[in-house]
Amino acid sequence: MAVPSFLARDRIVARPGFNRWLIPPAALAVHLCIGQAYATSVYKTALVEHFDTSLTAIGVIFSIAIVMLGVSAALFGTWVDRNGPRAAMFTSAVFWVSGFLVGGLGIETGQLWLLYLGYGVLGGIGLGIGYISPVSTLIKWFPDRPGLATGMAIMGFGGGALIASPLSRQLMNYYDPAYDGTAGTVPNGEAVAALFFTLAAVYLVFMMFGAFIIRVPADDWRPHGFDPSSVKKKALVTTESVSANNAIKTPQFWLLWTVLFCNVTAGIGILEQAAPMIQDFFRNGETSTVAAATAAGFVGLLSLFNMGGRFVWSSTSDFIGRKPIYMVYLGVGALLYIGLATIGSTATWLFVLLAAVIISFYGGGFATVPAYLRDLFGTYQVGAIHGRLLTAWSAAGVAGPLIINGVLDTQGTPGQLVAANYRPALFIMVGLLVVGFIANLLVRPVASKWHEPKATSPATARADTERSAVR
Amino acid sequence: MSHPATDHRQPTHTPVGLIAFAWTLVGVPLAYGLYNTVKAASALFGG
């Protein structure tokens, strides 16, 4: 599918002397916007009241969006690689903004299905394309520090929720003065619709700015003083190219899929239940020693560690290697989960510390995986391969809440649960992390039969996409 | 502003002001989000 010439990859090839430090803010401009997906809880109750429906019916909107994220990233990954980041960012912005507009219309007219179609389906497609849009470009601009580069962008996804949560509260307060953001007050539906329309306008500007300034490096471009042969010094790092269609036929892809699925499922186990979990862990009879405001602070702290982990751990992987850092995420993560299940209820500070580090590993797992893919499969179609790998996120987005909610449902009534009731779910997460740890250990270099012919350069590779697709 | 493919090899210079502007544009909202989140998280330590 051809794109208009102003979006074409050939039109955004950077000329010699272009400063690559303009690329991370372009990527952040997109990821900070689509990261709003993790801030939907601020208007969840308002939507339940407005549509007079259940929490589950509203929660489905987010689930649809995350499933569409994985599906669209997998389906359009090759298209993104072929047409370049400007076309991808532009398309992502159109879908993401349309999602808010159609969703807002659904709220305004009281039609929930429009919210499913808008925020869920259209917004979810925007999420998927937007999430992968800058990743392969960043890896190509920062071959010397791919973990740092993708960490910066994917940190933005975590940061997007940090911005959208307080901004949404303030905007809803502006549109409905009766709502002041404190517990017990709920904005009306009109305020939420107005919020959707406002966010659509703001996100359109930001994402188009990112699409406008993004550039791809010329095929022969190298950072000053960078010797590509030095990259090969680390085990598992290839200088070969593997197509997306071939990558999914390798055990390495499915091992990494398992790693991501296990890491994300385990992280969601805490994120999904964060606020009630800390209160339940320190419950004495009917009351908890942790107040609701403190629990909200705990959720905020987890957001910070989720975001910080993306940048810090992914950058660290440039020095210690991708396989070792995943051994930390999954191995140390499993030990921390055991600690949480066994001694987590002995002191609040210990519980908070354990959960915060676990969540930093969760974020780190997201941010490091593009660089891991680059190491194993090369830069040739890393965006498309990353897109296909994100189906693990969609699957984890369904499995994580199902496990934690399913187990807790068998343990008692919400509001009366205690630390011991969480143990079965936490030990399931430990088991998952061990499975992920073993999958990571089994990762070996990709067999040479999957490598593209040596003549394949990034430029010719794009022309060869159809040839690869039928292999 | 885009350039035709024939211009690819002509050297360019990225204005420092543009880089600063781009980082400010994404940095200010991020700082706003961080400030509000730290403020919320401080309840955890304030008792």
Image (spheres, coloured by chain):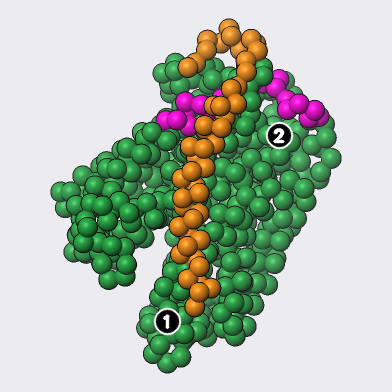
Chain colours: A green, B orange
Where is residue A268? Give x, y as percent. Answer: 50, 63
Could you say whether the residue bearing mark 1 is in a helix, strand or loop? helix
From the image, tell me which residue sits under label 2.
A143
Q: Residues within 10 Å of mark 1 (few under 14, many from 20)?
A: few
Tell me the quarter of the picture where residue A246 sits.
top right
Looking at the image, is A55 positioned above or below residue A339?
Answer: above
From the image, tell me which residue sits under label 1.
A410
| Front residue of A128 and A144 | A144
| Front residue of A251 and B40 | B40
Residue at mark 1: chain: A
Could you say whether the residue bearing mark 2 is in a helix, strand or loop? loop
Q: Residues within 10 Å of mark 2 (few under 14, many from 20)?
A: some
Tell me the quarter of the picture where residue A217 sits.
top right
- The residue located at (78%, 51%) in the rendering is A320
Q: Is residue A148 magenta?
A: no
Where is residue A361? Give x, y as percent. Answer: 62, 60
Q: Which span is picked out in magenta?
A: A208-227
User: Residue extending furthest bottom?
Assistant: A285
Q: Which SS type dominates the magenta stretch?
A: loop
Amino acid type of the residue tagged 1 in the rendering: Thr
- The residue located at (61%, 77%) in the rendering is A350
Amino acid type of the residue tagged 2 in the rendering: Pro
